[in-house]
Amino acid sequence: MNEYQYLNIVKLVKDYKLFSVLSQNYFLYYRTKIISMKSITIKVEDKVLTDADAIIAHLNTSRQKYFSNAIQQYNSYVRRKLFKKQLTKESKLVSKDTLAILKEFEELNQLENLKNI
């Protein structure tokens, strides 16, 4: 954020007498936060957009908010899938070692049981 943008926001805060806190590129106003956003352009099939518009009208929300939430949920879904894939891969790598260690513990347990007899 450059000085010009900062001064404009400070002026806005003074003009509207809003309480503001500057913290790590976030301006936090009472019950409202202003964060930087990027614009994107996407191509969507007509049917998908028509369905989305019907849902948006029913929810009484904006397209921006609806699609932003959809992207966040999809990102979360993909992250979980990638994590599961990585966990499965790493589990396969250590499974042989885990079985070997388990066998050693069983042998130690059997030896201990023989000593107690």
Image (cartoon, grey):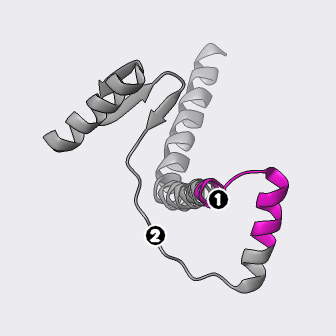
What SS does tag 2 mark?
Answer: loop
Q: What residue is pinned by disc 1?
A: 70
- In the image, is 76 to the left or to the right of 15? right
- Identify which residue is drawn at 83% across, 66% down: 54
Residue 46 x/y as whole percent: 73, 85
Q: Residues within 10 Å of mark 1 (few under 14, many from 20)?
A: few
| Among numbered discs 1 and 2, the one appearing first in the sequence | 2
Q: What residue is pinned by disc 2?
A: 40
Q: Determine if the magenta segment contains residue 66.
A: yes
Query: In which quadrant will I find the C terminus?
Result: top right
Q: Amino acid at mark 1?
A: Ala
Q: Amino acid at mark 2?
A: Ile
Q: On screen, 76 above or below 24? A: below
The span from disc 1 to disc 2 (Cα, nearest Å) is 14 Å
Residue 48 x/y as whole percent: 74, 78
Q: Residues within 10 Å of mark 2 (few under 14, many from 20)?
A: few
Residue 52 x/y as whole percent: 75, 68
- In the image, is 32 to the left or to the right of 69? left
**Between 34 and 77, the one nearer to me in the picture:** 34
